[in-house]
Image (cartoon, coloured by chain):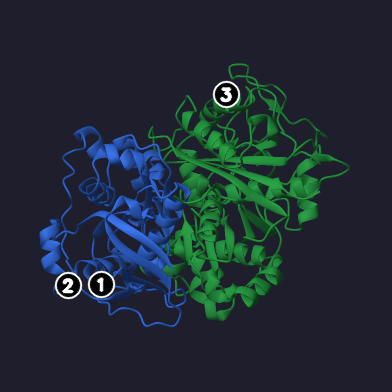
Amino acid sequence: MIPFSILAWSAWSPRIAERDTWRAWACDPELPTGSGTPDVRFVPAMQRRRLSRLARMSMQAALDTCEPAQLQESGLVFASRHGELNSSIAMLREIAADAPLSPTAFSHSVHNAPAGQISIQVGHRAPASSVSAQCATFTAGLIDALALSHRRRGAPVLLVAADEPLPDEFQVFADEPQVAHAIALLVSLDAGLGGAKLRLASAPGEPESPRGLPEALSFLAWWLGSGEAWTSSDAASRWRLSREA
Amino acid sequence: MIPAAQGTRLEALGLACALGSELDVVFERLVAPLCDALTIRTDLVSGQDLLVGEVREPLPVIPESYKTLRCRNNALAALALQRIAEPVRRAIELYGPARVGVVVGTTTSGVAEAGDAIDELVRVGALPADFHYAQLEYGGLSTFLAGISGAKGPTYAVSTACSSSARALISARSLLELGLCDAVIAGGVDSLARLTTRGFSALEAVSTVRSQPFSRNRRGLNLGEAATLFLMTRRPGGIRLVGTGESTDAHHMSAPSPGGEGAERAMRDALEDAAASPRDLLYLNLHGTGTLLNDASEGVAVHRVFGATTPCSSTKPRVGHTLGGAGALEAGFCWLVLANEQDGFLRLPLHEFDGEFDLALPALHLVAAGQRARVVGRRLVASNSLGFGGNNCTLVLERTGP
C-alpha cells in the first residue's frame, strides 16, 4: 500500500475544460465527446503550429495544473495508450505509396513527443518518462509517477494522461469508449507537501469499477465524486485507489 | 523524507541481438578484435542496401492464445524470456504473481507488421485478417510478456525513444524500492521496421556502411534489433543496478543539446546515486550512434565528466542501434563485462572504428582491441542512453562480493 497526495489537477476534453464543469460532470459522468482542440495561446504561434492535437491537449492540461516555474522543477510522466498513432498511420500510408517521410513528422511521432514538447516549451530539464499499458495506461502512468517521485525523494511529479480516439482505420479494434481527453495530476509521495491524501494498493481479483469511460476519465469521475474506492482496468494487474479517512 | 536507494540486483539476463542469444557467445563476439555480425537488408528502404543488426536465429512461435499479439517484436521478447524462464518461474512461485512486475521499453512494438497491414489496406481496401492493433500498441509488449510469464504485478511499456529500455530499468528499480514489487521482468525490445529505418533515413542519420562513432569519417548509424530482459529483485549480492541518472535537454525534438549538458547531468547524477566518483568507473558504454550530432554532444559531456581517462566504447557498430532496445541491451553488455571478470581484470568491448578520431572533439579514451581494465576498488561500469525529446539516462552497474 502506497500513500500519496494529489497537489493539483486539471482536465481537458472537447466538451469540458473548466474544473467546476468537471465537478458537475462527475455527478453523472457521460462520455464528453466532441472534436475541438485546445488553443494553447501561451505557446508562441511559430511553435504552436508544429504541435499535434495530442501535444496541445497534453500541454493545456499540464499548464492548467502547474505554473511553468513549478513544472520546470517537477518530474514529468506522460501516459498515453496510443501516443501519436495518427501520425504513425499517416507515415505508414506514405511508405505504402513509397513516398519519402518528413524528418520532422518522424521525430514528432515518438511516444514521448508531447513530453519533449512540454519540456522545450517551459524549459523543463528534470526527468521525464512516457508510458503505455493498453486500457490501464492511466494506472501505469500513476505508478510510474509515484516511482519517479520516490527517486526524487518525494518531490512532486506531474502526470499527464492523454489520448485521442483511435483513427478510422483501427476503430474496429476499439475495446474502450473513444474520446479525446487529457488529465493532469501533480502527485507526490511526500505527505508534508499537503494536498488530498490517497492510497494505492494491489487488488488482485477485485472487480473493475463500472466503466463507460476510458480509464483516466473513470478515475476523474471517482476522484471528483464521493465513491469510497476505485479500481483499475487491467484484469490481470488490478489496483485500487482509496481516499485516506 | 525517503531514504536513499540501496540498489537492486540484476539477477538473471536474457538477450537476443545480432551477436546471438547465448551469453558466452555474445560476450566473446563483443570483445573480439573482429566481428562481422551486421547483414544487408534491401527491403527496408527502397533502392538501398542497408547494413543492419538483425537477429538471425529462429524465434519462438507465439501460441494461438496470444494470436492478437503475434509480431516479430513479441517473438524476440519471447526468446529473451525463454533464457530467464527458470528464475522468473521461481520468482513468481516465491513472491506470488501479483508481486512480479513487467516494465519494458519499446519504440517500434509491431510497427513492422502494421506497415504490412497498411500496405494491404491501401492495396485491397481491408486490413489483413491476422492483423490486430494490439500488435502495434506499445503496451502490447508488456501485456504479452506478463501473459506468457504469469507475472501480474505492475505491467507497462516505457517509450522515450532511444532511452526507453534504460528508463524501464530505472522505473523497475523504483518499483522494487517502493515495495510495489518483489521482482520485475525489466528490459526492452525493438525490431527492424521500414518506418524507423525510413524515418532515420529522412533525418539523414543512416549510413550504408558500418557506423564509425567518433571517427572523422563517420557517416551515420546502422539500425538494429534486440530483446533484452533482466529479472530484477531486492536480493543482496550479485551484479546490481546501483546508480541511475536521468535528465531532459529542453532543447530540440531530434537533436541533443550541442553542449551535452543534459547527458552530463545524467552521468553525474548516476555516479552520485552510486556514491561513486568518475575515477571509480572502470568502463563506460557510450550511446555512440555514429551521427555527428551524437558524437559532438556526448563527446563533450563524457570528456567533462571523465576526461580522457575512463575507457569507453560504443557497441553499436557491432549490433546496430537497437533504438528503444538499446539501453537494456547495453546494460546487458555491461552485465556481461562484470560477469566475465578474469584474474582481476575486466575484458572490455572494443570501440570498433577506423582509428581516425575526430580531432574536432575533445579527447576520449576509446577501448582498443584486447584492452582490459584492472579491478582496483569497486567493480563499477556504466552505460549512456540518449533519446529523442532530449531524454537522457545513465545506468551504473556494480558487481558486489569478493
* Residue at which label 1 appears: A213
Are dots 3 and 2 in contact, CB under 8 Å? no
Left or right relative to B351: residue A177: left
The residue nearer to you, when weighing A196 against B241, is A196
| Marked residue chain, label 1 | A
How packed mark 3 is, by other alpha carbons closer than 10 Å (few <14, some 14-19, many 20 or more), is some
Helix, strand or loop at disc 1?
A: loop
**Outermost residue toward the right in this view:** B343
Q: Alpha carbon of mark 1 to alpha carbon of mark 3: how far?
A: 50 Å
Q: Residue at x 39, y 34 (%)?
A: B252
Rendered location of residue B356, percent (x, y): 69, 21
Amino acid type of the residue that numbered disc 1 sits on in the rendered structure: Leu
Indicate the colour of chain A: blue
Q: Nearer the viewer, mark 1 or mark 3?
A: 3
For the N terminus of chain A, the quadrant is bottom left
Q: Is A65 situated left or right of A202 in this image?
A: left
Residue B304 numbered tag: 3
In this figure, which residue is indicated by the disc labeled 2? A29
Q: Which image quadrant is residue A42 in? A: top left
- The image shows residue A179, relative to residue A50, as above or below, that is below
- Can residue B38 be seen? no
Dot 2 amino acid type? Pro
Question: The residue tagged with tag 2: helix, strand or loop?
Answer: loop
Check disc 3 and give the amino acid type: Arg
- Chain under disc 3: B
- Whether residue B67 appears in this view of the structure is yes
Q: B296 or A144: nearer the eye?
A: A144
